[in-house]
Amino acid sequence: MEVQYNKKEANTNTSEAGVFSCNRRSGDTPCYEILPVNSAVALKNISITAELTLPNPLTMESGIYITNDDLNLDLGETFSPWLPDVLFGLNFYFRINHELRITPQAGANSSVLLAPKQGWENISYNEKKPISLIARSNFGISSSGPFTVYLKCDQTEEEHCAIRSDRDPSITVPVESYLTLPVNINQEKVSKQLLKVGKDLENNIFNTINRVQNGSGHIDFKVKPFHVDNMIKRGADTYRGTVTVIFDSDLCSAPLENHIKNELFERRVTDAAMP
């Protein structure tokens, strides 16, 4: 803070200009100077340095943060009787912009085919072994903050997305979706974590421990054997549907004014052709 004042001695016509300045850091003695009686003071420049203690930005949601209370500045009770109690107030805000970018990996198709692991041609229907239909969609992820992941579907079966029969549209089959993320997201590795339909802020919240740049992840889709048996019993048919996997940085728990635009990772799933 720098204050310029004119020091006028009593009973004289002379005046002497002086400048008082100091730089105050956290923990230092406050800046002040006691001026002589009848001194005339002119405020020339006032600068204020504030030190804010913040959480780790990697744990904070994207958006604009605003302090709840103003920092009020006054010059003390005896400085001048005609000045207001508070000259001005300061309010602080800062913006957190996390990166959240999802890109299909090179060679990834916009559609995935649900099929047995060993392929339909190697299935022996007389062995009575359980058959699951599976598929995988690979993607790259860049992230520097917390986010949630959930599903949006054309048709649903309870908390899962579903595929629908072409031959009989009244028949739907649930498809389970499992998320795997690269290391440095969450304390424990995220491997085949079940995703559900709809945004649920009590589950599937992921916190980026260290910034991830184009890490590798994937989503596994699965139809359980019980449903596959029923599909086979119904005869030749094709089941298809669309699953949208939403990676969302808007967790709506901090006092934010704005949020960055949600990132969507859409995958068209899936044709399950029954022989």
Image (cartoon, rainbow, N blue to C red):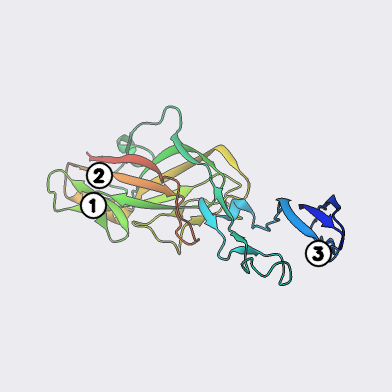
| Residue under numbered circle 2 | 241
Cα distance in 3D space between marks 3 and 2: 85 Å
| Residue under numbered circle 1 | 155
Q: Is residue 100 visible to us here?
A: yes
Residue at x 16% of width, y 49% of height: 234
Label 1–label 2 contact, CB within 8 A? yes
Residue at x 25% of width, y 44% of height: 241
Q: Residue 38 got which mark?
A: 3
Label 3–label 2 contact, CB within 8 A? no
Q: Secondary structure at mark 3?
A: loop
Of the residues shown, which amino acid type is indicated by label 3? Answer: Asn
Residue at x 35% of width, y 41% of height: 266
Q: Secondary structure at mark 1?
A: loop
Residue 258 location in percent, x, y?
45, 51
**Which callout, 1 or 2, points at the residue further toward the start of the chain?**
1
Residue at x 13% of width, y 53% of height: 170
| Circle 3 Cα neighbour tier, 10 Å, few/some/many (<14 / 14–19 / ≥20) | few
Determine whether, in the image, residue 161 is placed left or right of residue 191.
Answer: left
Q: Nearer the viewer, residue 192 or 245?
A: 245
**Which callout, 3 or 1, points at the residue further toward the start of the chain?**
3
Of the residues shown, which amino acid type is indicated by label 1? Answer: Gln
Q: Secondary structure at mark 2?
A: loop
Determine whether, in the image, residue 146 is placed left or right of residue 229.
Answer: right
**Which callout, 3 or 2, points at the residue further toward the start of the chain?**
3
Cα distance in 3D space between marks 1 and 2: 7 Å
Residue that lies at the very extreme toward the top in this rendered image: 107
Residue 5 location in percent, x, y?
79, 54
